[in-house]
Image (cartoon, rainbow, N blue to C red):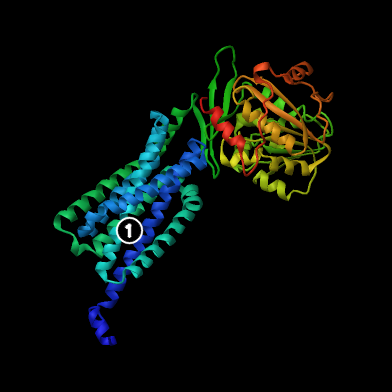
Amino acid sequence: MTTEASAAADGGPAARPRWRLSRAAVLVAVFVCAACGLVYELALVALGSYLIGDTVGQASIVLGVMVFAMGVGALAAKPLQSRAAAAFALVELVLALFGGLSVLGLYAAFAWLDLYGPALVGTAFVLGLLIGAEIPLLMVMLQRIREQSAGSAVADLFAADYVGALLGGLAFPFLLMPVFGQLKGALVVGAVNAVAGVALVCTVFRAELSRRARIAVGAGSVVVALCLGYAWITAHDFELTARQQLYRDPVVHAERSRYQEIVLTRSMREAGHADTDLRLFLNGDLQFSSIDEYRYHEALVHPALNGPRGEVLVLGAGDGLAVREILRYPDVRRVTVVDLDPAVVALARSEPQLRRLNGDAFANPRVRVVNVDAFGWLRAATERFDVVVADLPDPDETATAKLYTVEFYELIRLVLAERGRLVVQSGSPYFAPRSYWSIEASVREAGFATSPYHVDVPSFGDWGFVLAAPGGTPPGLALSADVSGLRFLTAGTLASAANFPADRGRIDVPASTLLRPRVLEYARAEWRGY
């Protein structure tokens, strides 16, 4: 076919720029819709990891259900292909509304209804159903602009789809979460989704819309805009109300950092306590209560500091409470705190009651703070420390389970000086005995001799620790003669702490490793009912 004949078949040279522009508009819509669809998926996974803590499980549920539903949605779109443009506009409006409100709805289901699991599955299915209907409708719309081979059309659509998914994957953690947060971020994406779908249909395919379809699209657009706008206006109040529903005491500070949700609550205690009870929660898990935190931190720190202690490494403990106890010793030259989240440390530096509680520890010139991942930091560390205090979040999430593995403790052993000592907060030997003894077994397998012990912390219950030293001789449980003024720990208390009752004695369980994080399995199973 000659060039002239080809141009005529395309409607002539004047028509060619129009179909190319229309085709580009469809591919841009594919790009935007794919980005929005992936953001919806990531938002569900992220919310589940914050609220439930099971990142792998939440990701498996969301992705599995959504991919299945996308297949169902693709089949369900077949009868809609005769009115592809109108159907696509309505699908995008419903998707924008449902996706934009998905985080808000799931948070409400978690806070008030205790129906998060079923709500998550239902939300993932509906979103997947709508996303799956997009590509077949867009394929029909693309072919109506200019018919081309099926292979070329599929290649064009999926190229735009995959590149759009890349944009959504990058925008969610680096733009939407930091700037808008999860709730408003989902609303923004819903609005973008609606605009992209309606704009395409009302410009390129306007002639294909019947009068009834135009009214439906217009009315739907107004409803979606009003719903998303109202949700945006009330989002802050909703989040405050829903968050307070999760906590017994009034919330006085709440923020969502890059890594976790940080909440401080404060109340007056009854039962003979006149002090204000300040509590810190990370992702909903209690970190301390100011009424009894001294029991935990004295038991954690002081047995390990009975010996050389010039250089002390603290892993975690961004609240500064463990550092407060370490600074009791004037011969401690430097305390290096490695905590992933700078927002926790910033709160410990600035919140007045928390500063009083930690003795303004981070203002002490002997304290150095490094905000990086502890595992990665240890791999590159060249310094040596007399004492390592591992005061890390419980191993009930994938991200934290690696900090309770043989490999992690082997890295710690490499940075310990001669006669160095390690202490690990190890959970509850009463409520989670397999988790506790698996941590102790992991420390032993890394080349340490261990001295397990436990104390009563009313806010937590019976809580355990593992004191360890490299080699074959377990370190003794004793207090240094240089420490005084402790409110809880005494020589007698510490001697008793080494004894475990018959119903909570040593359990022979395997160690936890990076490739087989058994402690994660144990922690999830044992804490499920609490």
Q: Is residue 391 above or below residue 78?
A: above
Q: Nearer the viewer, residue 293 or 379?
A: 379
Task: State the quadrant of the N terminus.
Answer: bottom left
Q: Nearer the viewer, residue 397 or 99?
A: 397
Q: Is residue 453 above or below residue 224?
A: above
Residue under the image location 58 percent in, 21 percent down: 276
Q: Residue furthest left?
A: 211
Q: In this image, 426 relative to 240: left or right?
A: right
Count of marks, rendered view: 1
Residue under the image location 31 percent in, 56 percent down: 134
- Where residue 445 appears, x then y in whole percent? 73, 37
- Where residue 241 appears, x then y in whole percent? 41, 31
Q: Which amino acid does the dot numbered 1 rest on?
A: Ile
Q: In this image, 307 relative to 362: left or right?
A: right
- Where residue 24 appears, x then y in whole percent? 34, 68
Q: Is residue 178 above or below residue 248?
A: below
Q: Is residue 270 above or below residue 282?
A: above
User: Is residue 260 at least partly visible in the picture?
Assistant: yes
Q: Residue furthest top?
A: 272
Dot 1 surroundings within 10 Å: few (below 14), some, or many (20 or more)? Answer: many
Under tag 1, what secondary structure? helix
User: Is residue 232 at least partly visible in the picture?
Assistant: no
Q: Nearer the viewer, residue 462 or 210?
A: 462
Residue under the image location 32 percent in, 64 percent down: 26
Q: Nearer the viewer, residue 308 or 527?
A: 527
Q: Kindly identify which residue carries mark 1.
A: 135
Residue under the image location 27 percent in, 83 percent down: 6
Q: In this image, 397 relative to 370: left or right?
A: left
Picture quadrant of residue 470: top right
